[in-house]
Amino acid sequence: MDEKLIQRLESAVSRLEALSVGGGPSLGDGEAAAALDPSIIAFDDLRSQFVGRVCTAAEKIGGQVLDVTKIVEEAFEAQRELLIKIKETQKPSMSGLAEFLKPLNDVIVKGTKMTEGRRSDFFNHLKAAVDSLTALAWIAYTGKDCGMSMPIAHVEESWQMAEFYNNKVLVEFRNKDANHVEWAKALKDIYLPGLRDYVKSHFPLGPVWSATGKVAVSAPPKAHSPSRPMPPPPPPASLFSSESPQASSSRPKKGMSAVFDEINSGMPVTGGLRKVTDDMKTKNRADRTGVISAGEKERRVSSPSFSKAGPPKLELQMGRKWVVENQIGRKNLVIDDCDAKQSVYIFGCKDSVLQIQGKVNNITIDKCTKMGVVFSDVVAACEVVNCNGVEVQCQGSAPTISVDNTTGCQLYLSKDSLETSITTAKSSEINVLVPGAGADSDWGEHALPQQFSHVYKNGQFVTTPVSHSGG
């Protein structure tokens, strides 16, 4: 038998003896047997191996990270107690289930309060830990009609929400503090593979309730003063509905039901319509003509000095990032005082041209239309995202150029940048122009494929670009 399993069995027996002999609450025979169930022992292994690891990392950090980690530990302890009770309890109704899961829900609510209010320096830690606790709600799965995903899928989906903030912790402290990196990695391991594999092994179809156990009671009704009449109960609302219950008769009717109600009311259909006289018709009105004056036409077609999104910007922020935003119709934009540690972010520009004279670390072109960018050298990458009809010219070298969700992009490469790696995704009309062999040779234009053929061969899919021939 596995040595770790023997240790867990001995630990469980020791706790049961301490509870029955000491001053702690005694367990009945059913709960004592449930505590020794293989699924409970496996859950104790999960807590010892994975939750214990993240607690160890949190103790080295301290502060709010340790506080929120203790809530994670408390939530797993609450779930353990629920798993033991499930084996001695019949499957409850929906109201009874809510009351049964209240101890776990109270812990999650306590954790949520830590993320509210003013953001702390460890907000990403708090959000990652608290959002991950929704994975423990797999225990509420009662069947395919309950509105939840299957337990295994629920755990994976819940972690995906928390992983956004967990990745921020990894990026922020990657080269700063190994304890924070260890904490983030340990937190992920709790759920993937920890909790997911546990649920897969023991409860793939949800918790198994007792057929002959005690009945879970619903929440008792609140006491009401005898001097006041008891208000009527609200209509039942869906557990997964965010709307407050409201009587259907008090709701305004919408759509075709309102139309038919008005038709069936007996009132004349045209009773509320106004009579249109000849002088009210557009063709007979003297103040309306089909001629547009030259001054009005100029006012309409003249381009605004800046976009509706905000005022134009061309500035260096924090000494590290050049920001070029909302430039409209500017053909002479220049950034000449830059270095290899700075990045350039271009956003919301239209009908403009920007020259970057010098080596920069990274260039991002986001949500621009008919924008031209000319740069010398880039250390990391040049990225084109969510654009339409842009032109990018590299006069020096660029290791990577990526084009994402863009329609119409012309890339001009120099001889020093012919080995550039070009990545495209969800984009069309991407053309790359390269210099000819001689000094007087014409540029060669190459269209990057946007259609691909996928064929299943020898146990795997083989992908090739689609080529169209004139024949």
Image (cartoon, rainbow, N blue to C red):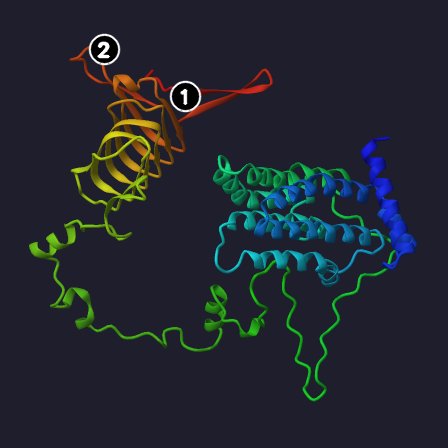
Q: CA distance from mark 1 to mark 2?
A: 28 Å
Look at the image and tell me in which quarter the N terminus lies.
top right
Which residue is label 1 attached to?
Answer: 466
Is residue 438 at all visible to an observer of this figure?
Answer: yes
- Placement of 284 over or under 153, stated as above or below: below
Badge 2 marks a residue whose secondary structure is loop
Q: Residue furthest bottom?
A: 227
In the image: residue 390, left or right of residue 331: right
- The crowd level at tag 2 (other Cα within 10 Å; few <14, some 14-19, many 20+) is few
- For the point 70% across and 42% down, the residue is 52
Point out the image quarter for the C terminus: top left
In the rendered view, tell whether residue 66 sits above or below residue 335.
Answer: below
Asked if residue 370 lies left or right of residue 36, the reply is left
Q: Nearer the viewer, residue 100 or 444?
A: 100
Q: Mark 1 or mark 2, which is nearer to you? A: 2
212 or 393, nearer to the observer: 393
Q: Residue at x 56, y 64 (%)?
A: 243
Quick check: can you spot residue 204?
A: no
Residue projecting furthest to the top: 438
Residue 397: % across, % down: 30, 22
Q: Quadrant of residue 426?
A: top left
Q: Amino acid at mark 2?
A: Ala
Query: Which label sits on residue 441?
Result: none
Instruction: Say few, some or many: other residues with alpha carbon within 10 Å of mark 1 (under 14 / 14 to 19 / 20 or more).
Output: few
Q: x and y percent of residue 364 in the render?
A: 33, 36
Q: Is 273 placed left or right of 193 in the picture?
A: left
List the residue tagged with mark 2: 437
